[in-house]
Image (cartoon, rainbow, N blue to C red):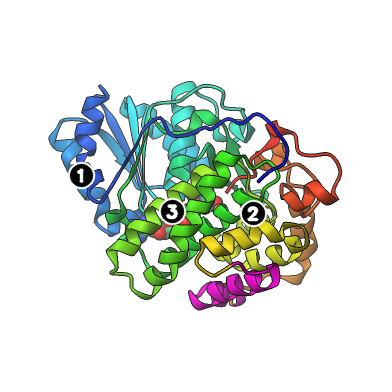
């Protein structure tokens, strides 16, 4: 447990509805909220899997559909979000449904604010820059990973600088999060593995962050318990709906956890690489996490043992925990994807510099200058603790 007695706040979605099939009732949900013109944000992959039609048709039948877009690229660039906001304004929408993975939900969260108040997505990068809630949102994840439907974070890509940026503000939290694991049944194998591993990294970092509160640590541990039982299973048996259900809830809890704690060095290292190489985010975080556990091990052994136990692996010491995480990334195919990626050697110093300089101004989180940034290890070995206004490092 964190030893400092500091105040704690919990920021959560206003309402969470979950369970297999819950998304089928979106039209009733929107009507019940008093919304009359609903715009659905999605992407081509989600449409191709037949999920957009499932949500759009009942909205259309109820006369509630203001429009839709599938023009959200993965790891959405700032200008794609601005274009989305313009389409939403033109549609006269009074509410948004974001149906997709983290990319779609993040674009929806920021576009909701830009559409309501003007300006551009770039103006909102950092901590608390949004300030006012945007159009009401319902966020409906179709991947089991980011937990974006439960976080006050959105990650966008600055294609000019080649890096990823965070918008962090509680106003991004949705009016309603709908966690329907049936939407994840069609996930491709690599997305299942990468997104699921990212959820595990969220849980590990939220649990060990030096700003972690008892509330966030409880959510993180329960998330790890679910992931331990379900991630490998869902990768080897994609038709196991019970494992899909467990992953959907676990990813949601991990989002709640890190959004009320922080992501740490794994994400500080992952974001600059993700901005340059168009790899799935979870491929990077999932393959980096073992090294970070090794690095933080000397001062985080008790936490690592608790996490390993929650995962069902027994109370492992940090080297054994790190090795098990490496094996997991390897066995579900993430390591091979990173190995096959060419990162020019000349870029490495810049990646390292950007990782250690993660700051609120650049990514909307972080607390400066040490690779143990945001980790409890940093509390022991580095200088002053983080400015609480500066967390979280985005997921
Ligand atoms: N806001 C947050 O709190 C937070 C946290 C972690 C990560 N992120 C960000 O989220 C993004 C990654 O999100 P992601 O991992 O969910 O992937 P994603 O949203 O980028 O989707 C990956 C691919 O899977 C497809 N897809 C999604 N659901 C599908 C389904 N059910 N069936 C078939 N195809 C489907 C999409 O069309 C896309 O091609 C990154 O930009 C990352 O930085 C945000
Ligand atoms: Fe993440």
Q: What residue is shown at x 64% (from left), y 43% (from top)?
A: 212
Secondary structure state at the residue bearing disc 1 = helix
What residue span does the magenta drawing correspond to? Answer: 315-339
Q: What residue is shown at x 49% (from left), y 32% (from top)?
A: 172
Is 306 situated left or right of 54 in this image? right
345, 155: nearer the viewer: 155
184, 125: nearer the viewer: 184
Query: Could you tell me how far apart the alpha carbons at marks 3 and 1 are, in whole angstroms?
Result: 21 Å
Residue 335 lies in magenta, yes or no?
Answer: yes
Q: Are marks 1 and 2 in contact (CB under 8 Å)?
A: no
Label 2: how many Cα within 10 Å (few below 14, some 14–19, many 20+) = many
Query: Could you tell me how far apart the alpha carbons at marks 1 and 2 are, in whole angstroms?
Result: 34 Å
| Residue at mark 2 | 267
The total of numbered circles placed on residues is 3
Query: Could you tell me how far apart the alpha carbons at marks 3 and 2 are, in whole angstroms?
Result: 19 Å
Q: Position of residue 197 (x, y in %)?
A: 51, 63
Q: Position of residue 145 (x, y in %)?
A: 46, 55
Is 6 situated left or right of 380 in this image? left
Q: Main secondary structure of the magenta part?
A: helix
| Residue at mark 3 | 250
Is 277 situated left or right of 389 in this image? left
Q: Where is residue 359, by image quadrant?
A: top right
| Residue at mark 1 | 24
Q: Position of residue 124 (x, y in %)?
A: 59, 31
């Amino acid at each position: 447990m964190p030893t400092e007695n500091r105040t704690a706040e919990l920021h959560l979605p206003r309402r969470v509805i979950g369970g297999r099939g819950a998304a089928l009732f979106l039209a009733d949900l929107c009507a019940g909220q008093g919304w009359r013109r609903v715009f659905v944000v999605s992407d081509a992959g989600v449409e191709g899997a037949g999920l957009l039609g499932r949500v759009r048709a009942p909205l259309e039948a109820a006369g509630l559909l203001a429009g839709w877009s599938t023009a959200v690229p993965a790891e959405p660039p700032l200008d794609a979000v601005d274009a989305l906001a313009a389409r939403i304004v033109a549609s006269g929408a009074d509410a948004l449904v974001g149906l997709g993975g983290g990319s779609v939900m993040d674009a929806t969260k920021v576009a909701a604010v830009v559409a309501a108040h003007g300006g551009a997505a770039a103006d909102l990068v950092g901590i608390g820059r949004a300030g006012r809630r945007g159009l009401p949102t319902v966020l409906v994840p179709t991947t089991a990973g980011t937990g974006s439907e439960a976080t006050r974070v959105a990650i966008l890509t600055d294609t000019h600088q080649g890096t990823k940026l965070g918008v962090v503000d509680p106003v991004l939290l949705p009016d309603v999060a709908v966690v329907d694991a049936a939407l994840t049944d069609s996930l491709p194998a690599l997305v299942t593995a990468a997104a699921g591993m990212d959820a595990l990294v969220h849980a590990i970092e939220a649990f060990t962050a030096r700003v972690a509160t008892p509330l966030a640590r409880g959510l993180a541990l329960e998330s790890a318990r679910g992931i331990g039982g379900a991630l490998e299973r869902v990768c080897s048996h994609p038709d196991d709906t019970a494992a899909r259900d467990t992953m959907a809830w676990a990813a949601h809890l991990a989002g709640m956890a890190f959004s009320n704690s922080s992501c740490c060095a794994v994400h500080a290292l992952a974001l600059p690489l993700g901005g340059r190489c168009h790899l799935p985010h979870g491929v990077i975080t999932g393959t980096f996490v073992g090294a970070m556990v090794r690095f933080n091990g000397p001062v985080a052994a008790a936490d690592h043992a608790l996490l390993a136990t929650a995962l069902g692996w027994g109370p492992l010491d940090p080297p054994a925990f790190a090795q098990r995480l490496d094996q997991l990334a390897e066995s579900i195919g993430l390591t091979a994807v990173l190995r096959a990626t060419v990162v020019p050697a000349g870029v490495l110093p810049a990646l390292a510099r950007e990782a250690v300089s993660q700051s609120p101004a650049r990514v909307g989180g972080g607390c400066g200058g040490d690779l143990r940034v945001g980790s409890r290890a940093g509390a022991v070995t580095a200088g002053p603790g983080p400015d609480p206004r500066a967390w979280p490092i985005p997921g």
